[in-house]
Amino acid sequence: MSLNSADDPPTPAPPRYNVLGIGIAALTLEGARDLVLSVRGAQRRGYICLGTAHGLAEAQRDPALKAIYRAAWLTTPDGMPLVWLGPRGISRVYGPDLMLAVCDFGRTVGLRHFFYGGAPGVAGTLCEKLTARFPGLDVVGSFTPPYRPLNLDETAAFRAEIARTRPDVIWVGLGTPKQEKFMAEHWAALDAGVLIGVGAAFDFHSGRVPQAPRWLRRLGLEWLFRLGTEPRRLGPRYLKTNPRFVLHVLAQLTGFKKYPPP
């Protein structure tokens, strides 16, 4: 695998397939991992969205969010429904798995990591657990933002910290759609390689929230496990957006509604 220098052109994105007017990258977890590793030493390559039924359903109601997905360097098939809708040979690019794979293999090329997001204390615990799991992991910083947009002083301080630490990857754990909007707003002004919105990966790998068994994830039923563990918070999300996503997909597959390709 060849790695880009800061002056090289960005690594070309893989082919995309159209799901509800959003281009989903046709790739595997290993392919996504290698693309992230390719940004080592580069700056401002863009941002990566992890595509889910929830996110794509929300994007049908929010044109700004849809534009963010369409402008991403990659929007990956994070949810199993997006894998099922894609071409043969692709695999799920699940945010928590991508984080582990990039942290593991990134040690061989000296990838530098910054963690942004999570509830108070979560980012710090996450860094501790990942550095214990992957000796030699280069974590250059972490930041827990307030539950509101950053003000001007906070934005300036955050950008200065990124300029000082110069991470290759900024992992963003704010949840959808907050993390996608944050990445789209800030990526071009940050001296970093790539931003990746991984949502609940912060909670899972810090041990704050239990993760669904792998067999449930393979069946596309992780949402049911998470609904059972956090019904009050996640009930409105899954019980509203999942049916909307199914209806939109049926409309696309039957030709009842056209979703222009990105």
Image (cartoon, rainbow, N blue to C red):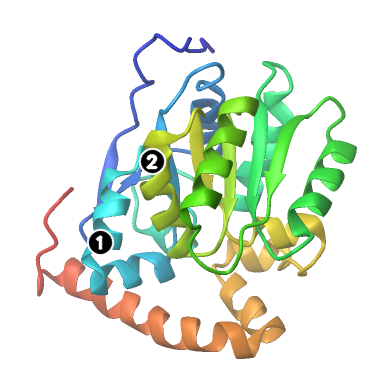
Q: Which residue is rendered at x = 29% and y = 35% of the image? A: 15
Position of 108 relative to 201 (above/below): above
- Does residue 50 show up? no
In the picture, measured across the screen, residue 258 lies left or right of residue 9, that is left
Name the residue located 67 percent from the left edge and 60 percent from the top edge: 118
Q: Secondary structure at mark 1?
A: helix
In the drawing, does residue 56 fall left or right of residue 128? left
User: Label 1 belongs to which residue?
Assistant: 64
Residue type indicated by callout 1: Ala
In front of the other: 82 or 215: 82
What's the amino acid at mark 2? Leu
Kind of element beneath mark 2: strand
**As drawn, is 15 to the left or to the right of 105?**
left
Residue 261: x %, y % from top left: 15, 50
Image quadrant in which the N terminus is located: top right
The location of residue 258, given as percent across then percent down, is: 9, 65
| Callout 1 crowding tier (Cα within 10 Å): few <14, some 14–19, many ≥20 | few
Nearer to the camera, 165 or 220: 165
Residue 112 vs 116, above or below: the answer is: above
Residue 142 sits above or below residue 193 on the image? below
Query: Cβ–Cβ below 8 Å for labels 2 and 1?
Result: no
| Residue at horizontal 18 percent and vertical 74 percent from the top | 251
Image spot of residue 262 (x, y percent)? 18, 48
Q: Which mark is residue 74?
A: 2
The structure residue drawn at horizontal position 68% and vertical position 25%, both measured from the top left corner, is 106
Sequence-earlier tag: 2 or 1: 1
Estimate the x, y position of residue 156 in percent, counting from the top left. 51, 42
Of the two numbered discs 2 and 1 in the rendering, the one whose residue sits closer to the viewer = 1
